[in-house]
Amino acid sequence: MTTDERLILLTNDDGVRAEGLVRLAEALDGLGAIHVVAPDRQRSAIGHAITLDTPLKVEEVALSAGLRALACSGTPTDCVMVAVHGLLPALPDLVVSGINHGANMGEDLTYSGTVSAAMEGALMGIPSMAVSAAPGAGGRVRYEAAAAAARAIARLVLDRGMAPGTLLNVNAPSCAVDEIQGASVTRLGYRDYAITIQESTSHTGERLCTIQGGPSDHPGQPGTDVEAIAAGRVSVTPVSLDLTASALMRDLASWPLDQLLRPSHDGPRQE
C-alpha cells in the first residue's frame, strides 16, 4: 500500500483545539491521509465511556496550520466509533490518540480517554496507539519528543502491522528531540494517587463532593513506563485487550466452585 492510499484517524481527549492534537497531525503529515475527529471540549479521565441513544453533534472546524477537523460532542471513544462507522471514506489503517497533555502510565490506563480511544480502534481490529507527553520540570509539558516518537512508531506500525487485540501506549518526556535518552519497551508501572475529597454546600443547600489530587511517581520500578520516563526515555508499552488474569485462573481451578453451585439432591442448603 502506498502512502497516498493510507488513511490515519487522529483523536484525543483534551479536545479538538488542544495543542497536542495539532502537533500530532503535523508529526504524521506525509504518512497517509490524515482525518481528525475529536471531542469538541475537554474530556479527560472519562475512560471508555460511550454515548448511547443520544444524537452527537458533529461540525467541521479550522485548526492552526490550515488543519481541518471534525469536532464531535461525544467522548473519545464516541469519536472513533462515529468516524469508523460513518464519517470516514474507508477503514483507517491506523488510529492514533493524543498527544495527551500529561502522562498516561500505570493505572492511568483505567481512566484515560486518550488510551480508551486507541483501545476502541484495537477492538475494531485497527492498529492503534496512544501517545502522551509527561510533564517536565515545573509541570511544563512539551510536545517535541512525543511528536517525534509518534511519527517514528506510527511508521513502524504501518509497515509491520500489529498483533490482533493489542495496542501501543507511548509516553515521552517533555524535552527537545535531541535530549531524548532513547526508547524502551516497558510494562505498566505503579503510580500512587493522593486523593482528597473537598466537601462543600451549593447555594441551594445540596451537599457537594469534589475529587482532587494527582499521581506521585515511583521511578524505582525496573522495566516500567514510570522508570523509563524518569530516565528521559520514551516508553512503549504493549497493551492487550485480553484482561484475563491467567495466573488467577490457575488458582481458581483448585476452588470447589462446581461442587458449590451444582444442584443438590438434598435440596437447598439451610443456613
Image (cartoon, rainbow, N blue to C red):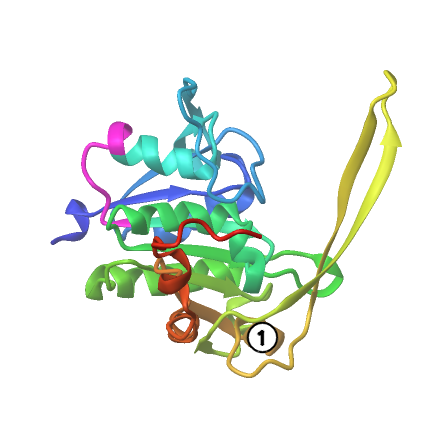
Numbered disc 1: secondary structure? loop
Mark 1 is on which residue type? Answer: Gly
Inspect the magenta stretch and tell me whether residue 91 lies in it.
yes
Quadrant where the image shows the N terminus: bottom left
Looking at the image, which residue sits at the far front? 266
Res. 158 visible in picture: yes
Inspect the magenta stretch and tell me whether residue 64 lies in it.
no
User: Badge 1 local density, few (<14 within 10 Å), some, or many (20+)?
Assistant: some
Report the predominant secondary structure element of the magenta stretch. Answer: loop
Res. 67 visible in picture: no
Q: Considering depth in this image, is 190 or 97 the residue closer to the camera? A: 190
Q: Residue 238, relative to residue 90: is it above or below?
A: below
Q: Residue 242, relative to residue 224: is it above or below?
A: above
The residue that appears at 48% across and 53% down in the rendered structure is 269
Residue 3: x and y in percent read 18, 52
The residue that appears at 42% across and 60% down in the rendered structure is 260
Q: Considering depth in this image, is 236 or 108 the residue closer to the camera? A: 108
Asked if residue 155 lies left or right of residue 261, the reply is left
Q: Pointer 1: what residue?
A: 232
The residue that appears at 38% across and 50% down in the rendered structure is 119
Residue 175: x and y in percent read 59, 66
Image quadrant in which you'd find residue 134 = bottom right
Residue 76: x and y in percent read 45, 38
The residue that appears at 35% across and 62% down in the rendered structure is 258
Asked if residue 250 lies left or right of residue 156, the reply is right
Q: Considering depth in this image, is 189 or 263 the residue closer to the camera? A: 263
Residue 219: x and y in percent read 65, 77
Q: Which residues are magenta?
A: 85-94
